[in-house]
Image (cartoon, grey):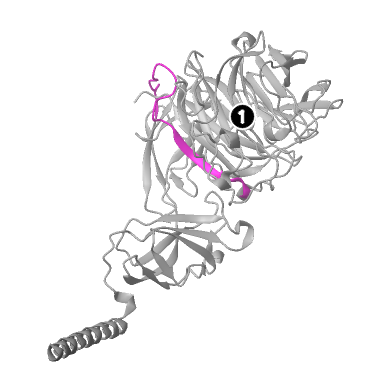
Amino acid sequence: MLNGDKTLNLNMIMKKNILYFLAVSLTVLAGCQDPEYVLSTSKDQGITRLVVKFTTGDYAEKTAVEYTISDASADAYVIPIPWFYPESSDNETTEYMSAMKVEANLTNNYSIQPILGILDLTKDNYFTLADPDGGKRKISIRGERTKSDACSLLAFSITDPALTGIIDQDKQTISIISLDDLSSCLVNYTLSAHATISPDPAVTPINYNNPVEFTVMAHNGTSKKVYTVQKEIPLKIGFGFRSGSQVSLYALDVSTLGFPAVSVNTAPSLAVIGNSLVLNFGDGSTPIYLNKTTGAKQGNITLGSASAAGCVASDVHGTMLICNHANSGENFKVYKTKSATASPTLFYSYANTSGYPIGSKVSIQGDLDGNAIIVATCEGISGVSSSSSFVRWIVSGGVIGQPEVVTANGVSAWGGIDNTPKLAYRSTNISDGYFLGHYDGGNDNVYFVNSNTNSPVSYLTGQSDGSGWGMGNGILDVKEFNSARYMVLYSVAYFPMWGMPSGIYMYDVTSTSMFTNAAVDNSQALAFKNSSVTSFDGGSAPGDSRTGDVLLYPSSDGYKLNLYYIDNTNRVVGCYEFDCIDK
């Protein structure tokens, strides 16, 4: 037995030695293998997106491009850098290419070495991409300046007689609604940034009594669209805008337009005048204006004797009011203009006896040359006072009436500019009521108010996901379009850096029967919503002025409805377009 035990132990020792030798051999062999070419068994993509940011100049830390990766097997990534930034400008990106910050979105448990950072995108930059299974492969990243392939004809209007073309982008047709002789006409037009048109209708008079074709060529010299212009009357759907017609024309970083840093007691505002969208910063500086269709910056408006320390506002026909900011006891002066370049004239002056500051939030319902309602919301003073009032003026036949101070009942009071609402009347008939909401720390209802009692009739509650505590549900506008009446709510996110984006909610309020006790984002009255507006906040908390503006603007021909918005917190200005063309 003893000898047998020794034999057994010897066999066991030999087996252990053999296993140890095999283990060491495998380790050595593994150590000799090139780590860059370990076969991957992972089926994930690895890199899903590359984000490129500027590192110098006026656009430092701004995103130049977000490049989505669609090929999971790619090992050479060529990022298309826009030729110009912003795209609508003439600012070339050549000087930035040699030092741009690159960030990657990686699938879980993937890694990249060395760590991405500031790269010279004029050349190949090599990295090792490692997957969760230990597989590794070499990849390269570089940039390539790329000319835009956008080639759309965005606006088309004959100058004499004054006619606006109705553009159908799907069919690439432009309809001119007219019985006039159009045998020799010049045209104003808007194209995609840096595109060209042939023949050029702004230079060469053309006969539009018969169909005419135009070719729009993109900046890249290859992409193009051919549009046909003809005299006709497109059919409309019977009511409201056509479902699915909405398109985002632009969403721009206001910092690239010269928008100042967010500060206390300022509020941005919007107005449409002619073919331009006016942006007022609310800090007393001169407002700027953009091409309302493309967002391209055009210049600064002419203020003359007016002060824009309050806000701008406009009616349904593009008449703009420019307002100062007046504390209680000061004069509230409102100037009127139809031109971005001509000096405005004084429309009215009001000795502010409301007991509150006014001027940061003004809304207009109707036509200032006909019948309209003008409202200036009375502002509380943060930490000092609160308000539930507004000043109202009735315009009849183009003549403005006496001011009336109105108090809303059954609605909690608001504080400073940060949560002062922009309320909206449902029509030019006071008896049709008005809509009102504001930031209220979680109880952020939007009310429909009876004008006779100034008390709520119905309301919508804050966001259904409980995020209403961080949203300002108080920026409103109402307009009629194709026999329907729409109310839009711009819900300002107070904390976008916490993953709480602003939202746009548009409701059919032709009848208010569906404007009932439901959340703002799932009401039966909803006709359109975007619960995640593009944000350019950069992840940092803003100042105290967490507010914005929203404006609905129907085209004079009745075929299109534009929705403009601006947001101090998210640093964005944008536009949606809707139409009622029967297709």
- Residue at x 38% of width, y 37% of height: 227
In the image, is 577 to the left or to the right of 428? left
- Badge 1, how many Cα within 10 Å: few under 14, some, many 20+? many
Can the viewer see residue 158? no
- Identify which residue, 152 or 493, lies in the foreground: 493
Q: 544 or 307, which lies in front?
A: 544
Q: Secondary structure at mark 1?
A: strand
Looking at numbered disc 1 in the image, what kind of residue is underneath it? Ile
Q: Is residue 319 left or right of residue 67?
A: right
* 250 lies above or below 103: above
Q: Is residue 220 left or right of residue 550?
A: left
Q: Quadrant of the N terminus?
A: bottom left
Q: Position of residue 153 (x, y in %)?
A: 44, 39
Q: Quadrant of residue 570?
A: top right
Quick check: is 24 in the magenta stretch? no
Residue 437 visible? The answer is yes
User: In this picture, which residue range is highlighted in magenta?
Assistant: 230-255
**Residue identified by numbered label 1:** 475
Residue 355 position in % (x across, y down) = 82, 23
* Horizontal and vertical percent position of residue 211: 37, 31
Q: Is residue 28 above or below residue 38?
A: below
Left or right: where does residue 391 sit relative to residue 365?
A: right
Q: Is residue 235 magenta?
A: yes
